[in-house]
Amino acid sequence: MKKASAVEDGGGLRKEYDLSKLKGGVRGKYYSRATAGTNLVLIEPDLANMFPDSESVNRALRVFAEAAQMPGAPKRRRSR
């Protein structure tokens, strides 16, 4: 016996949801506002386990950045 397709059962929507009344929708209308000031960075799974949330990642990066700016901090060597 075949399963009923999503089209036949209304795609999981109830009868009272009339999609013909939804007009004027604009795809991506708020995309630029939602992503403004956002910088998505993917980290390796082993590091993700060490940092449970964005607050802990930000704290660790601030400590690292402060240490890198200290006068006696080791400078990066250029590879030859």
Image (cartoon, helix red, strand yellow):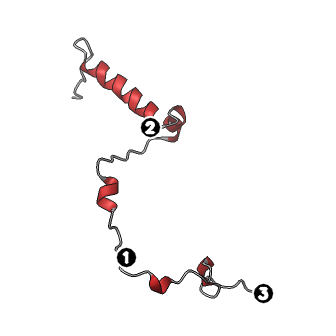
At horizontal 32% and vertical 67% (from top left) the residue drawn is 29
**Front residue (pair 11, 52):** 11
Residue lying at the far right in this picture: please name it: 1
Element assignment for label 3 = loop
Amino acid carrying label 1: it is Gly
Residue 79: % across, % down: 24, 29
Determine whether label 1 and label 3 are within 8 Å by CB.
no
* Disc on res. 52: none
Q: Please tell me whether mark 1 or mark 3 is closer to you in this view.
A: 1
The vertical placement of 73 against 17, above or below, is above
Amino acid carrying label 3: it is Met
Q: Quadrant of residue 14?
A: bottom right
Residue 52: % across, % down: 52, 36
Choose the circle earlier in sequence order: 2 or 1: 1
Residue 27: % across, % down: 36, 72
Element assignment for label 2 = helix
Instruction: Using the numbered discs, state the Cα–Cα distance from disc 2 to disc 1 in whole angstroms.
Output: 33 Å
Choose the circle earlier in sequence order: 1 or 3: 3
* Disc on res. 25: 1
Instruction: Using the numbered discs, state the Cα–Cα distance from disc 3 to disc 2 in whole angstroms.
Output: 49 Å
Q: Is residue 40 left or right of residue 4?
A: left
Quadrant including the C terminus: top left
Q: Please tell me whether mark 3 or mark 2 is closer to you in this view.
A: 2
Amino acid carrying label 2: it is Ser
The vertical placement of 47 against 77, above or below, is below
At horizontal 52% and vertical 32% (from top left) the residue drawn is 50
Dot 2: few (<14), some (14–19), or many (≥20) neighbours within 10 Å?
Answer: few
> Which residue is identified by label 2?
54
The vertical placement of 78 against 1, above or below, is above
> Which residue is identified by label 3?
1
Dot 3: few (<14), some (14–19), or many (≥20) neighbours within 10 Å?
Answer: few
